[in-house]
Structure formats: C-alpha cells, structure tokens
C-alpha cells in the first residue's frame, strides 16, 4: 500500500504515479494526520511511504505518526522522498525509524520536484516547474520498478555535508524556522476558508471570515500556496513570488473546482489524466 503526505501536490503526484504503475492502493494520510488517527493498518504488499523532505529528513509529524501506527501484513517499507534539491542523509534516520517500528527498511529514494518552500525560497515559474516534473520521471519509474520487483532502492552515496544537513542543521531548523508567526492575510482574502481546510494540523481558525494562525505549524506551505486569491503572505519574503502547487492541482483550482476538506484526494486526481495534462502543458510550453 502506498501512503502519502503532501502539502502542495508533488508527493501526491509521485504516489499516484507509482501506484498507477504497480497497480497498488494509494492512500492520502491527510485525514489520519489531521485527526490523530493512529489505528492499525494492513497491507499484503510492501508499504511505500511518499513524502516531501523537510530539512533533509521526513517531516516530524509523519515520523511521529509512523512511530505510533502499527503497520501490519507485509514488513517491508520503501520511502520515496520528494525534494527541491536533495534529501541529505535522510535514509539513516529512516533505517532507525524502521527498526523502532519493527519493519524492514527497503531504502529511500530521492525525487527532485519543484521547490514549494515559499517561506524561505523562490518557487519556480510554471514552465520551469513542468520541466522539473518531467525530469523526475526516470526516478519515479525506478521507484515503481524496484517496488514492483521487490528489490531494495539503490541509494545515492552520502557526503559529509549530507550528514550535517540531516543531523545538526535539521535539529536547529525546526526551532528556528518552523513557526506560523510570520503568516498574515491581505485584503485579497474572500473568506472561502480553504486555508483552514487544507491545514494538516488544524492550525488555522477563521475569525470574522479571516484566517488566524495558531502555534502548531509544520510549514507545509499548503495554506499560503493553495489560497485561490494568493491572499496569504509570509513576512516580506513571499511578496510577489509565484505560489507553487503541483500543476494539475493549480489547473483544477483555475477551473473553479470546489476544494473540499479532505486534502487533495477529494479533487479526484486521475493518474492517466495527470500525465496527459502534464504532457499537453509541456508540449504547449515548447511551442
Ligand atoms: C518546511 C520545508 C522544508 C523543506 N526542506 C527541504 C530540504 O531539506 N531539501 C530539499 O531539497 N527540499 C526541501 N523542501 C522542498 C520540498 O521538499 C519539495 O518542494 C517537495 O517536493 C514538496 O512536496 P509536496 O508538494 O508534496 O508538499 C522543503 C519544503 C518545506 C515546505
Ligand atoms: S484561502 Fe485565501 S481567500 Fe480563502 S479564507 Fe484563506 S486567505 Fe482567505
Ligand atoms: S498553518 Fe499553513 S503552513 Fe502551517 S501546517 Fe497549517 S497549512 Fe501548513
């Protein structure tokens, strides 16, 4: 079974791409994380966890959920980590996590996707994002083939810098950078409530039709990037920057599809349709 967590759609796409290829069930963890549902799960097939990398390791909320949730049936766990540039030494910590869970670690694969971290960096333009997604295809294919054939992932060699990034820098990053203090809403807000609906930590409440942020934030960037009016800013940094969501998600929003409060699953992504849309848009951009 393929389980995914995703703030802005990259990991959702990766999960569905792999699931479509190997014909396995794909489940969005959004509701389980939001509701603290750690009830036991069962899969006959190997588990595949697809997630963004946050500070060169898996997001802490996902690590905590995995520690608390009993995954039964097949003991093998593969990790597919989407990232903007690199996953550092994330595998080391995932190996330990699997040992704690009593599961069999089958490797951790890096998939470079468009950068979504608008609080600190600049997300790519639409055309650039589509190019990056196209370039991720071999890694996704490799992931599907390895899982489908039961082989472990071939992991990249780890450098000294990778060790420092996933170790000391990760430890400092959370207390220093991961908070919601800099979010604010502008007059462009139309009080649709989507920002509150897409928060995996229920950290946003609506007051007088406007979002107010609490203290339980994991910096997933869903609220700021998925606001249909780009009415959320993060300090001065996000001003004028493009909001990133996986292309098909952005197209759905542009078509006026109603966002529902179940994460992206409710938007009914279809694997083949996603790829067709992506291909069509890439070809369109090249003309
Ligand atoms: C809080 C945060 C931390 C991030 N840390 C890293 C990182 O350490 N290395 C990296 O290459 N990308 C990093 N990124 C970029 C995301 O991992 C990347 O864009 C990912 O594909 C987003 O996945 P999603 O769309 O499924 O949420 C970070 C993004 C966020 C929001
Ligand atoms: S998603 Fe945007 S427009 Fe909708 S309530 Fe939140 S800030 Fe306002
Ligand atoms: S407040 Fe925004 S960035 Fe923080 S966890 Fe919720 S949706 Fe993600």
Image (cartoon, grey):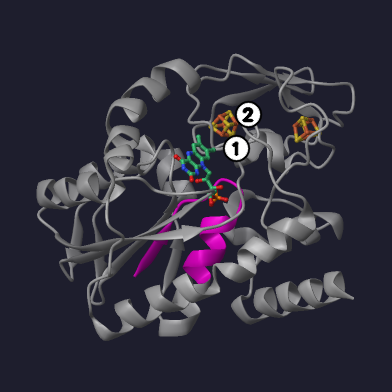
Q: Which residues are magenta?
A: 1-16
Location of the N terminus (image quadrant):
bottom left
Return the x and y of residue 7 as percentages of the image width and height. 56, 45
- Residue located 60% across and 76% down the image: 271
* Disc 2, SS: loop
Q: Nearer the viewer, residue 13 or 73?
A: 13
Q: Which residue is mark 2?
A: 119
Q: CA distance from mark 2 to mark 1?
A: 5 Å
Labels in figure, total? 2
Q: Nearer the viewer, residue 248 or 237?
A: 237
Q: Which residue is mark 1?
A: 117
- Residue located 46% across and 61% down the image: 111
Location of the C terminus (image quadrant):
bottom right
Membership of 4 in magenta stretch: yes
Q: Are marks 2 and 1 in contact (CB under 8 Å)?
A: yes
Specify whether 101 is left or right of 123.
left
Q: Is 58 rendered above or below residue 272?
A: above
- Residue located 63% across and 70% down the image: 134
Q: Is the CB of the residue bearing disc 1 within 8 angstroms of ligand 1? A: yes
């Amino acid at each position: 079974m393929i389980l995914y967590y995703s703030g802005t759609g990259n990991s959702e796409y990766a999960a569905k791409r792999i699931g479509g290829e190997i014909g396995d069930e794909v489940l969005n963890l959004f509701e389980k994380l939001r509701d603290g549902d750690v009830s036991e799960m069962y899969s006959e097939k190997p588990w595949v966890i697809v997630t963004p990398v946050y500070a060169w390791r898996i997001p802490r909320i996902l690590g905590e959920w995995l520690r608390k949730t009993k995954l039964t049936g097949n003991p093998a766990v593969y990790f597919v980590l989407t990232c903007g540039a690199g996953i550092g030494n994330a595998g080391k910590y995932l190996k330990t996590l699997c040992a704690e869970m009593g599961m069999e670690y089958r490797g951790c694969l890096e998939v470079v996707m468009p950068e979504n971290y608008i609080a600190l960096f600049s997300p790519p333009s639409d055309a650039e994002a589509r190019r990056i997604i196209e370039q991720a295809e071999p890694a996704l294919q490799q992931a599907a083939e390895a899982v489908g054939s039961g082989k472990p992932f071939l992991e990249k060699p780890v450098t000294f810098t990778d060790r420092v990034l996933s170790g000391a820098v990760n430890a400092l990053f959370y207390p220093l950078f991961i908070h919601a203090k800099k979010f604010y809403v502008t007059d462009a807000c139309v009080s649709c409530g989507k920002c509150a609906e897409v928060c995996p930590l229920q950290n946003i409440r609506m007051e007088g039709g406007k979002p107010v942020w609490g203290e339980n934030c994991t910096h997933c960037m869903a609220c700021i990037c998925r606001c249909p009016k780009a009415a959320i800013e993060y300090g001065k940094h996000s001003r004028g920057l493009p909001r990133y969501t996986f292309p098909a998600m952005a197209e759905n929003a542009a078509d006026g599809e109603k966002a529902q409060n179940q994460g992206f699953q409710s938007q009914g992504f279809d694997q083949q349709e996603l790829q067709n849309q992506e291909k069509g848009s890439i070809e369109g951009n090249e003309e």
